[in-house]
Image (cartoon, helix red, strand yellow):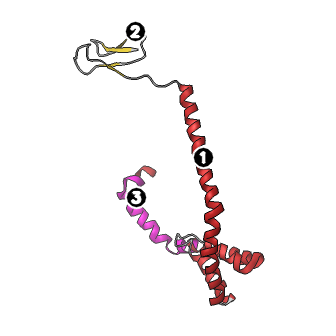
Amino acid sequence: MTYLEGNDGGRSREGDGDYVKLRWGTQDSQSEVALPSPPPRGAAKLWFWVKLVASFLCLGLLAFIVFQWVGPFFIEKVIIPITNWERNRFSPSELAVMLFGSIALFPTLLLPSSPSMWMAGMLFGYVLGFMLIISAAAVGVSLPFFIGSIFHRKIERVVRKVSKESFCFKICR
């Protein structure tokens, strides 16, 4: 389809072609730029799905390779020696205190506590590890609340002060 700039500033439609003529200012009709027509919509969708399936197949193959070869090697060379060192170095009560503290404090400090939970389950078994994890997680989720309630007034003052100055807070109100 051809679009021509009219005298009145509007666009007029001319022809039934598959391209658009672009004109800049008052140039001749000889300097037209033909844009290639987009591929058919059905073919574009099919090509998108083919690429998506191929990407997922490659990612699945990579995950399989990591799971089969890299995972066992990492567990044998890194995780088992660390676990054995912790068992030999610390007593069970010291381990329990360390794991409880890490599970309770790490989320407050925005650090992941999942490795500590995994270690507690491996070192203390299913029942004792579960009890240790649940009690430490209860303390861990309560700490930010108590810290926030202690400093509630100060946080509120800072937010009021910043909200008067900050454009983002003005929009939110």
Q: Amino acid at mark 2?
A: Gly
Between 93 and 19, the one lying in front of the other is 19
Q: Residue at x 57, y 71 (%)?
A: 107
Between 28 and 39, the one lying in front of the other is 39
Q: Which residue in the structure is indicated by mark 1?
A: 56
Say above or below: 49 vs 32. below
Mark before the other along the chain sequence, 1 or 3? 1
Q: Which residue in the structure is indicated by mark 3?
A: 163
Mark before the other along the chain sequence, 1 or 2? 2
Q: Amino acid at mark 3?
A: Ser
Mark before the other along the chain sequence, 3 or 2? 2
Calculate the distance from the C-alpha at mark 1 to the C-alpha at mark 3.
45 Å
Q: Which residues are magenta?
A: 145-169
Q: Helix, strand, or loop for circle 3?
A: helix
Q: Position of residue 10 (x, y in %)?
A: 33, 15
Evaluate if marks 1 and 2 touch, with contact meaning CB atoms under 8 Å apart.
Answer: no
Q: Residue at x 62, y 69 (%)?
A: 73
Q: Quadrant of the N terminus?
A: top left
Evaluate if marks 3 and 2 touch, with contact meaning CB atoms under 8 Å apart.
Answer: no
- Residue 15 badge: 2
